[in-house]
Amino acid sequence: MELGLDGDAALVTAGSGGLGLASATALAEEGAHVAVCGTTPEHVDEARATLEATGDGDVLAVEADITEKDAIEEFVAETVDAFGGLDHVVTSAGGPPSGSFLDTDDEDWQRAHDLLVMSVVRTTRAAYPHLVEGAGSVVNITSRSVKEVIDGLVLSNAVRRGVLGLMKTQSHEWAPDVRVNAVLPGAHETSRIEDLVEQGVERGEYDSYEEGIDDWSEGIPAERVGDPAELGETVAWLCSEAASYVTGTAIPVDGGSTRSV
């Protein structure tokens, strides 16, 4: 499907790796100019090289800590300066630490809130004046944990739900000029899962990487973990005119693993 994103300007937070980079890559493949940020020079450089080799659009890749208000505002301003505007925002963030409720202290809660919620608040607030100039869009990458809690992930289970409340509110307040949606990924074969599986192999829990990936596939009706590109393609579709009647929606991309309605 031709998505009509050629020449559009897109910003992806935490887009130097994982599902953020997969989303940025999908947008670049559609011809969009893409800006991403990351926290390490190595990841930023690798993301820049990947995106420049992907599409014909321009690429901006910078270091920025999305838990810092000034860094987010500077990233948005730099993107607008580089591309002459901003059409799409994709918010992504690394996952907070795992742990149970009683093992999680006040500092953990505050860091998770800054990472998962305030980064979205600040990014979308800074981007709104530019998005509203055209038929702009926002897509928030969250987690299937906002629909069904996952054992040992109290911070993700609780804090990420604030993003859905924000998404739903913005989809009403910003309509019809800006569409706002979310995707709820399940297990995807990102570097994070690859590392966890490899650590399991080293500990003797799995005989091979393939066995570890198969173990992660247990309970998923699709009988496999996702390819990050599949999530990225969903994000690109939500940014496009093909999804022009879709707003205020949270779409699971999880191979059917979410059991709730």
Image (spheres, rainbow, N blue to C red):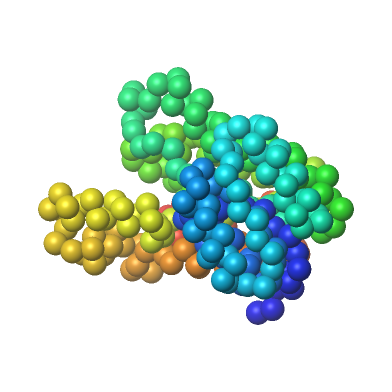
Q: Is residue 254 shown above or below 119?
A: below
- Residue nearest the observer in this picture, 168 or 177: 177
Would you say residue 220 is visible in this rendering? Answer: yes
| Residue 186 image-quadrant placement | bottom left
Q: Which residue is depicted at the point 35% across and 67% down?
A: 224
Q: Is residue 49 above or below residue 250?
A: below
Position in image of residue 166 (x %, y %): 66, 39
Q: Nearer the viewer, residue 165 or 78?
A: 78
Q: Left or right of 143: which side holds 33? A: right
Image quadrant holding the N terminus, namely bottom right
Say which of 261 and 124 sits in front. Answer: 124
Instruction: Tell me: residue 224, above or below residue 37.
Output: below
Residue 64, position in %: x, y? 59, 41
Residue 220, compared with residue 116, is above or below; it is: below
Counting from the top left corner in percent of width and height, residue 132 is at 84, 50
**Position in image of residue 29 (x %, y %):** 61, 72
Q: Residue at x 54, y 31 (%)?
A: 113
Q: Residue at position x 43%, y 67% from top?
A: 227
> What's the residue at 58%, 65% (across, down)?
51
Left or right side of 92 for 259: left
- Identity of the residue furthest to the top in this view: 106
Note whether residue 218 is visible.
Answer: no
Q: Quadrant of residue 128?
A: top right
